Image (cartoon, rainbow, N blue to C red):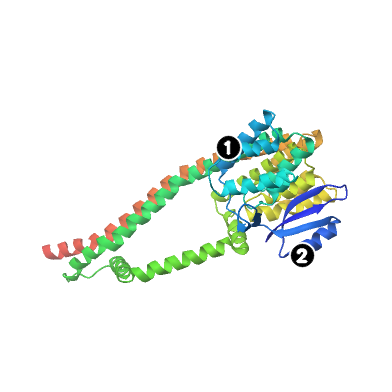
């Protein structure tokens, strides 16, 4: 489970952190071992909305909608408007919806004296994981507008990378669906037509033809149980996939898949590097920035591999050494991080690392596409050829017997 913890450090800072733990008691024990003061621990996903007067499960804000919100916020702050006035102005023109209701709640909390970062942290299930921490860094440094603009750049780069991955996967998905539909039409509608012809002839049927006819008859007679079974299995799979065990298992297997696994691996590391670079550029110390950046990684397997780096750096180890111990980061990336640590420009070097990984993702996606198209065409050709052979082979035998 994920928990949102509000803690106080020995140097007087109050932090909002996201942690993964089996239950609240084990997380409280872990935080007490760190020597921090615990103000509050609550599960992520439940937030209080004063506009509706009750608790509700948040629905994530759309990336494009949140991007526009941040662009408007940065423009209003640059124009010199106070924060509360800027929130009021944006709310006047915002259409009704869940985002508006949450933003009204945030505005009300800011009006009572709460920090903007704390108000957003109470809705951590709705917004990107590192956004409240970005705001906290801007509030401490007095550069809220510049920090928001850095987050805008970060969000634009992440959205662009995800669009490239999704766009690259559309064409293979269309090919696969088309192939399955063609096979289904042949099995359900075309084969039964030939079955009538075969039943009226005395020609012995080859095994491939018998198997094809049996398959077509099965789907014709039991299409409803098959449909119900597929729907049930799909429903159970989705439920299992959303569980922690299911997501962890699937994420682990995804990075092992040939060709596409390395793409997902590099994409997760790019996501981690860019998040960490954005947090460090806002003035956040390395250890809390690492905690947030690791939690922001979407792939649970990669996230668990990166988790030990937090404790290693907290105990005084170098960041590049902690990354090397994970065994999931390439030597080139480790060397770049080491140079960034040595020169004091770790945030800039991490930005370069994420750019480098994004380029590798794009190149590998293009290679994957160039392989998928001929493979799918060969697969479709082999399947259709096998079906045609199974259908016409008895006809050729019958024709030969007639001539004989």
- Crowding at label 2, few (<14), some or many (≥20) Cα neighbours within 10 Å? few
The quadrant of the picture occupied by the N terminus is bottom right
Residue hosting label 2: 26
Q: Is residue 211 left or right of residue 286?
A: left
The quadrant of the picture occupied by the C terminus is bottom left
Q: Secondary structure at mark 2?
A: helix
Q: Is residue 291 left or right of residue 260?
A: right
Which one is nearer the viewer's eye here, 263 or 199?
A: 263
Residue hosting label 1: 68
Total marks shown come to: 2
**Which residue is found at the position 72% from the left and 65% from the top?**
23
Q: Quadrant of residue 46?
A: bottom right
The x, y position of residue 225, in whole percent, is 37, 71
Q: Secondary structure at mark 1?
A: helix
**Which residue is found at the position 47% from the left and 43% from the top?**
369
Q: Is residue 311 visible?
A: no
The x, y position of residue 154, in whole percent, is 64, 38
Q: Is residue 351 above or below residue 399?
A: above
N-term-proximal mark, 2 vs 1: 2
Q: Is residue 5 visible?
A: yes
Which one is nearer the viewer's eye here, 223 or 395?
A: 223
Q: Is residue 255 above or below residue 404?
A: above
**Which residue is found at the position 23% from the left and 60% from the top?**
392
Question: In this view, which residue lies farthest toward the right?
Answer: 10
């Amino acid at each position: 489970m994920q928990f949102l913890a509000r803690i106080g450090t020995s140097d007087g800072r109050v932090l909002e952190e996201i942690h993964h733990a089996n239950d609240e008691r084990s997380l409280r024990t872990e935080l007490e071992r760190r020597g921090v003061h615990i103000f509050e621990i609550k599960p992520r996903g439940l937030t209080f909305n004063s506009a509706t007067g009750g608790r509700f499960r948040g629905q994530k804000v759309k990336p494009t909608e949140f991007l526009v919100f941040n662009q408007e916020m940065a423009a209003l702050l640059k124009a010199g408007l106070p924060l509360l006035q800027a929130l009021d102005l944006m709310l006047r023109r915002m259409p009704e919806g869940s985002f508006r209701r949450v933003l009204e709640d945030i505005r009300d909390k800011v009006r009572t004296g709460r920090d903007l970062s704390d108000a957003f942290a109470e809705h951590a299930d709705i917004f990107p994981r590192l956004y409240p921490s970005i705001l906290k860094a801007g509030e401490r440094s007095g550069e809220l507008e510049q920090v928001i603009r850095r987050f805008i750049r970060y969000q634009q780069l992440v959205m662009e990378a995800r669009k490239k991955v999704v766009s690259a996967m559309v064409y293979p998905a269309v090919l696969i669906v088309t192939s399955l539909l063609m096979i289904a039409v042949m099995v359900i509608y075309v084969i039964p037509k030939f079955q009538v012809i075969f039943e009226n002839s005395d020609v012995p049927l080859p095994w491939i033809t018998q198997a094809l006819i049996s398959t077509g008859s099965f789907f014709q007679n039991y299409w409803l149980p098959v449909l119900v079974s597929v729907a049930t299995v799909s429903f159970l799979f989705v439920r299992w996939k959303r569980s922690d065990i299911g997501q962890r298992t699937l994420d682990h297997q995804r990075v092992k898949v040939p060709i596409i696994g390395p793409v997902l691996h590099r994409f997760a590391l790019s996501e981690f590097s860019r998040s960490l670079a954005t947090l460090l550029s806002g003035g956040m110390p390395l250890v809390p920035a690492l905690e947030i950046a690791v939690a922001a990684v979407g792939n649970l397997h990669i996230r668990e591999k990166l988790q030990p780096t937090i404790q290693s750096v907290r105990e005084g180890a170098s960041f590049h050494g902690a990354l090397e111990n994970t065994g999931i980061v390439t030597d080139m990336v480790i060397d770049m991080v080491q140079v960034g640590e040595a020169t004091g420009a770790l945030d800039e070097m991490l930005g370069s690392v994420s750019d480098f990984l994004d380029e590798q993702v794009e190149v590998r996606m293009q290679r994957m596409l160039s392989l998928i198209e001929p493979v799918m065409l060969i697969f479709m050709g082999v399947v259709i050829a096998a079906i045609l052979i199974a259908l016409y082979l008895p006809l050729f035998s019958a024709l030969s017997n007639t001539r004989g």
